[in-house]
Amino acid sequence: MKSDAVIFDMDGLLIDSEPLWEEAGAELLKEFNIELTPEQYHSSTGLRTVEWIAHWFNFFKIEEQYANNAVTGIINKAIDKIEKHGVAMPGVPEIFAFFKDRGFRMAIATSSPIKLANIVADKLNIRHYLSSITSAEALQYGKPHPEVYLNCAMQLGVSPAQCICFEDSFNGMIAVKAARMKCVVVPAPGHYNLEKWGAADIKLHTLHDFNLEILNKMAL
């Protein structure tokens, strides 16, 4: 089926925000004398903050009564850091122009709060390209559940099979494939060669690498 829509994840794909989220999480967990290893942090990339907190609070046996304030604390820290220091990932302006020139509808589907998604859309000057900005914040399930992608496709008025999705996290890739959409994964440099990306349709080093040849290949 011909693809008519493109859906982008946001953190770590469009904006270099993952280190800033990691800082926010580290600052919060430090209050409980906890420090995650890089591997531990990467394993939970792509989760909503509420699920991220629930996962690590359960893992480290932190009392649940502190969870709500922890979620709010991380989100506020991250929004402040990203608004001040977040920069576009390589290839962002070019890939939006590429799909606009070919008549694709475009959207963002993110685990982050809608407030942050709106800040990023303006910060990167991509709002005028977007037909929808969808957040898993208020949905029943977050990634790796496909709900945010299915909801985004519904808002775009297309079937899941008509969507090409760009992701940078394993949890996001699983969500895309569970939604039965085509997946282009752009892993962080240190994780590019890991076998776990095998479920993706295409794997790229950066958004710059996407081109007409790849698009035509995905249409087959």
Image (cartoon, rainbow, N blue to C red):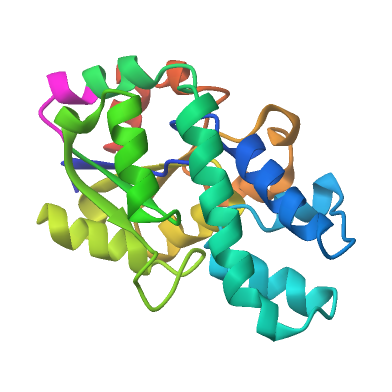
Q: Is residue 199 magenta?
A: no
Q: Splitting the image into 4 quarters, where does residue 28 fall?
A: bottom right
Instruction: Examine the rendering and report whether any part of residue 97 can be seen.
Output: yes
Q: Nearer the viewer, residue 217 or 106?
A: 106
Residue 13 is situated, as x and y percent measured from the top left of the image, at: 48, 34
Q: Splitting the image into 4 quarters, where does residue 205 fall?
A: top right
Vertical side of 203 occupied by 76: above or below: below
Image side of residue 37 versus residue 47, left or right: right
Q: Is residue 100 magenta?
A: yes
Instruction: Examine the rendering and report whether any part of residue 3 can be seen.
Output: no
Image side of residue 160 versus residue 11, left or right: left
Tell me the quadrant of the picture where the C terminus can be found. top left
Residue 153 is situated, as x and y percent measured from the top left of the image, at: 21, 57
Q: Residue at x 76, y 50 (%)?
A: 26
Give the residues drawn in magenta, as a range: 99-105
Vertical side of 157 occupied by 131: above or below: above
The number of numbered discs placed on residues in the rendered structure image is 0
Q: Residue at x 20, y 42 (%)?
A: 5
Image side of residue 29 versus residue 185, left or right: right
Residue 149 is situated, as x and y percent measured from the top left of the image, at: 33, 59
